[in-house]
Image (spheres, grey):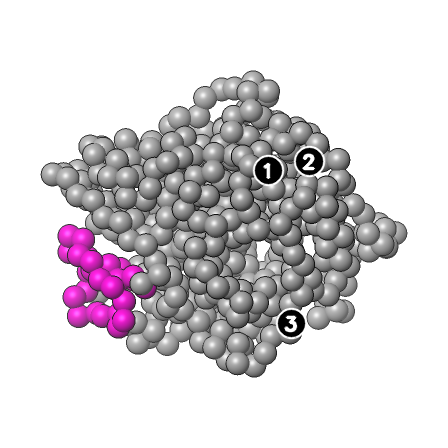
């Protein structure tokens, strides 16, 4: 995987061919020509940005202006306080007060894989690029090798590892809520700074403003491409765009499946109601040329039905100025997991619906040990932290990386620490799980946006209730795959 990627190392004998290069202290930063790099330096501070960053509280700021503002901050705390209110998809390399660290966007949608060997540091956005650059063969455990042939893991769980490592056991991923100190070669959890206590009504208004401003800021740099479905997350993205009167292209991918058909029907209804610039895109089965090239980009590629979307973008995207607007992280607005299940390792594994194997048990055990104190200190539910750090940061972020192959950038307005933690600390689980918060937020953002049904039941939903699908779905999956 090379398109839109980066590689960072202090090993001067390492080289990434055809990449641009920049010096940062003892490190060399390599980037693909499509990936933005912004660099600013003052007497005591150096800041290098990979990707794009926005400040929804000051929408006109560019990548370079934000980088310049960061370079004028004189303490690590001041930098982290500033970044708490920023969105985007980025990696920042920062040197300040004799400290050098790497930090990502809130949900780590621009990933950091890191590897320490022989006193050298290696960082990259993709584990395959990192291994290829170092001429290393993948090192995959016996348990993980078995998963390469596990059709449920590949197709239903969609390659979801709960640990810091993906396929290769030597490489770790930097998760949300963490920064990587590359002087001491260790991770640190990021404190919370700016989160105020707000009333329910105030957090609704503030959340809506941040979302609207986020889309407004992004629209100053990119042409907005906004998919619409019958779901809540895409509806909120549409609502924010309509509220700001933004020019956007709306679309939906039409593939096989009952829920896709439901989404297409809802999208057509929304397009008619709100007079949208809308099209239905019919995808094609993956062709062999695409598969052969795609396989080269990853250690084990995800070849799912939705990979047809990436193939379509790869073949049809005409402008690199477009950005795909998505609702990654929207489950946090719905209290996706049950907090009362986050008591024991076995209960957590059952709640998040993965296999109770040694890999997952070890991963959950280590995560609990590293997270419990943080959750208590800031009064954040473990279930919400799991969704943010593990489900979003280590799994949902895979889609953003895969879209790099199609040379399409992605943006989620939810990808903002201040936005996320403000709503987590100022709403109750019941307000979110009942969808009261979400519906109120939708109507606050654009009145009347909920008049068209959200996620209406299909015949499959009715059948699932009759056969107690949730209780037996693992058996159904095994039969299907």
Query: Is the residue 344 above or below the residue 425 in the image?
Result: below
Q: Earlier in the sequence, mark 1 or mark 2?
A: 1
What residue would you read off at disc 3? 284
Screen quadrant of the N terminus: bottom left
**Camera-nearest residue between 28 and 18:** 18
State the residue at coordinates (54%, 44%).
247
Q: Earlier in the sequence, mark 3 or mark 2?
A: 3
Judge left or right: residue 174 versus residue 77: right
Query: Is the residue 34 above or below the residue 267 in the image?
Result: below
What residue would you read off at disc 2? 449
| Mark 1 vs mark 2: in front | 1
**Camera-nearest residue between 152 and 288:** 288
**How far apart are labels 3 and 2 at the CA level?**
32 Å
Judge left or right: residue 341 versus residue 45: right
Q: Earlier in the sequence, mark 1 or mark 3?
A: 1
Q: Is residue 23 magenta?
A: yes
What residue would you read off at disc 1? 242
**Residue 419 appears anywhere in the view:** no
Which secondary structure lies at badge 3? loop
| Mark 1 vs mark 3: in front | 1
- How crowded pointer 2 is (Cα within 10 Å; few <14, some 14-19, many 20+) is rated as many
**Is mark 3 in CB contact (under 8 Å) with mark 2?**
no
Give the x, y percent position of residue 78. 28, 31
State the residue at coordinates (67%, 59%).
280
**Camera-nearest residue between 290 and 336:** 290
State the residue at coordinates (32%, 54%).
36
- How crowded pointer 3 is (Cα within 10 Å; few <14, some 14-19, many 20+) is rated as few
| Residues rendered magenta in the picture | 7-32
Which secondary structure lies at badge 2? loop
State the residue at coordinates (30%, 72%).
133
């Amino acid at each position: 995987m090379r398109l839109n990627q980066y590689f960072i190392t202090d090993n001067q004998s390492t080289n990434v061919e055809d990449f641009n290069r920049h010096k940062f202290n003892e490190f060399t930063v390599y980037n693909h020509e499509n990936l933005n790099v912004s660099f600013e330096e003052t007497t005591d501070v150096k800041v290098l940005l990979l990707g794009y960053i926005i400040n929804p509280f000051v929408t006109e700021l560019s990548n370079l202006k934000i980088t310049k503002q960061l370079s004028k901050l004189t303490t690590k705390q001041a930098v982290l306080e500033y970044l708490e209110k920023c969105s985007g998809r980025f990696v920042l390399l920062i040197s300040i007060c004799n400290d050098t660290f790497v930090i990502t966007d809130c949900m780590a949608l621009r990933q950091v894989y890191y590897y320490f060997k022989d006193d050298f540091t290696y960082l990259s956005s993709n584990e395959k690029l990192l291994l290829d650059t170092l001429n290393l063969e993948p090192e995959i455990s016996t348990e993980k090798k078995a998963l390469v042939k596990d059709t449920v893991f590949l197709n239903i769980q969609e390659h979801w590892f709960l640990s810091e490592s993906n396929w290769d056991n030597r490489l770790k991923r930097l998760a949300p809520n963490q920064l990587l100190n590359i002087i001491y070669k260790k991770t640190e959890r990021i404190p919370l700074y700016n989160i105020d206590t707000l009333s329910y009504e105030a957090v609704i208004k503030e959340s809506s403003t941040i979302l609207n401003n986020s889309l407004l800021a992004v629209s100053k740099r990119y042409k907005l491409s906004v998919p619409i479905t019958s779901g809540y997350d895409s509806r909120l993205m549409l609502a924010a765009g309509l509220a700001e009167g933004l020019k956007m292209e709306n679309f939906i991918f039409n593939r096989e499946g009952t829920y896709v058909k439901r989404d297409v029907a809802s999208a057509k209804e929304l397009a008619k109601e709100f007079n949208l610039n809308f099209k239905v895109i019919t995808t094609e089965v993956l062709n062999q040329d695409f598969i052969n090239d795609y396989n080269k980009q990853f250690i084990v590629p995800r070849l799912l039905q939705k990979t047809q979307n990436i193939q379509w973008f790869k073949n049809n995207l005409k402008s690199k100025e477009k950005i795909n607007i998505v609702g990654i992280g929207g489950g946090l607005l719905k209290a996706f997991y049950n907090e009362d299940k986050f008591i024991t390792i076995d209960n957590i594994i059952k709640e998040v619906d993965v296999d109770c194997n040694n890999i997952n048990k070890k991963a959950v055990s280590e995560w609990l040990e590293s997270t419990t104190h943080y959750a208590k200190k800031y009064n954040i539910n473990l279930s919400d932290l799991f969704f943010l750090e593990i489900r979003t940061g280590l799994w949902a972020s895979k889609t953003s990386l895969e879209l790099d192959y199609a040379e399409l950038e992605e943006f989620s307005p939810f990808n903002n620490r201040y936005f996320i933690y403000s709503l987590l600390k100022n709403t109750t689980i019941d307000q979110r799980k009942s969808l009261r918060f979400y519906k109120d937020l939708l109507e606050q953002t654009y009145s009347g946006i909920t008049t068209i049904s959200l996620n209406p039941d299909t015949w499959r939903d009715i059948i699932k209730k009759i056969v107690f699908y949730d209780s037996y779905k693992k058996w159904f999956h095994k039969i299907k795959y």
